[in-house]
Amino acid sequence: MTSRRDRVGLLGAALWAAAGAPAALGQVGAANRVQVLDRQLQQLDRQFRLSVPEGQPIAERALVDAGASLRVAFFSIDDETSDAHYLRQFDGRVYARVEIDGAHRFYGRLKFQYDDWNSGQSFDGDGDDWNDPFLDRLWYEFDLRGLRRAQTGEHTDYNFNVKLGKEYFYWASGLVLSQNLYGGTADVELGSFGFTALVGQTSPLETVDFDASRPAFDDDTERLFAGGMLELRNNPNHAPYVFFMAMLDENDEGQVNLGGAFPTRFDYDAYYAGVGSRGSLGSSLRYRAEFVYQFGESTTSSFDPVGFGPLPQTKEDISAMAGLLGLTYLVQDHSDTRLDFELLAGSGDDDRLSSSDTFGGNLPGSRDTAFNSLGYVNTGIALAPEISNLLSIRAGVSTSPLRSRGDLFRNLRVGVDGFVFLKIDEDAPISARTDRGENFVGGEIDLFLSWRILSDLMFDVRYGLFLPGDAMPSGEDDPRQFIYLGVTYAF
């Protein structure tokens, strides 16, 4: 007799391939491409976020600083069928920073970003457009230790730091949270221990949700974060920590009729308990490690993968996990060479058709074991999969080979990363479409060149090539490429 899971796998796969699949499924497929693009651009934007310093200490009582930058970039991005989409992006940013007494810091930055796609090639269907919002950063920070240092010159073994406004928040290793938020953090340090509290709301217009089946997932996402972290800070070699983070669903769509035939509600409240450590093992080896357990409640799918019709929704418990282990070896040569290794893993759910969506998601009567969050970790730029049901192995090397050849080439850096992607559960989905019964998703090679030609002029190249494995379905098993060329001028 055919088991229930086999029926789900066979009939679910047939459904996704059927020419008569509901329009809602096609919409979700397009939405997933928007999610992939967001993850690809996050990898590039991570470096650009650091191109303008946001809060360096000063010796004077007050500092007023202002400046701007302009980036012109070209992208060639292959979709799941290996068709190239071409984008020219123009990114201008204007910032102002004020610091008083080394303790009071004010920072604001405006972003003017315009996307120019080839005709009919934008992933969200909006075509050429300005990227909202224009207010990129706006925050105030108070640092008690900085104030005491400015007033008395002493370095205290206690501190209180608070930061309020709109800022990019990167929590722990990034597995749970890595997003722009409206909110704040408060950090208290007493002797050996430090405690950090965070409360924040996602920036709706610029947050791409993990649930791509939810209406307006890419321009109206409202999730509330609240949590705390306790860290040991007196050991120069090891900084262990524990944390708790709540992610509460503030989206309010009510019941939506997807595809005209599937009444659907969306509700996903998750909690994350984590433990980790970062530090060094000797003078040359750096490490980072984290384990996260996710629990809470999610709303089940409104689509029946066996009968192909509507399915009454229920709420089921979430029980998922994810982990990270990273090592960096510093060669300590004249070229500042470093070797990197990273292992990422996240649990999946084999009764889902989608690893993260409500529509096609967890079925009634079963726990939701797929790990989902609004975090970000590096899984490459060509395939850019989410961590749910994924085992990602990365090894890389980077160096500055011409550092001793004069000032012109001193800041030229090149590197390569190699990835291997596997499904942890061969019958569960990942964020890219795959066949059931196969584990090997494929491999990827990412190359980069970063060259600060002058103090205010930067040139960047990124290239990613994904080579599909046995798990990639027919029609989506050709190599995929991601190409980025960018020039940034700051003044």
Image: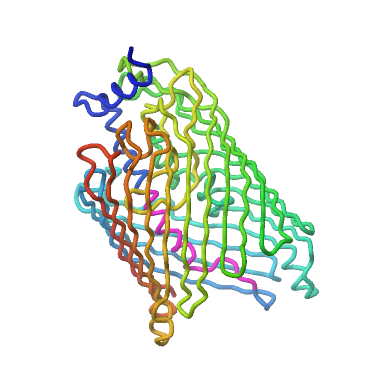
Q: Quadrant of residue 103?
A: bottom right
Quick check: is 54 in the magenta stretch? yes
In the displayed structure, 233 sits above or below 15; it is below
In the displayed structure, 217 sits above or below 279; it is above
* Horizontal arrangement in the rendering, residue 228 relative to residue 76 (left or right): right
Tally of numbered tags: 0
Residue 414: where, in percent of width, then height?
A: 38, 70
Residue 111: where, in percent of width, then height?
A: 43, 59
In the displayed structure, 403 sits above or below 41; it is below
Residue 71: where, in percent of width, then height?
A: 36, 66
Question: Farthest bottom residue?
Answer: 406
Q: Quadrant of the N terminus?
A: top left
Q: Quadrant of the C terminus?
A: bottom left
Q: Write down the region rendered in magenta.
A: 37-57
> Foreground: 111 or 363?
363
Q: Quadrant of residue 293?
A: top right
> Foreground: 49 or 112?
49
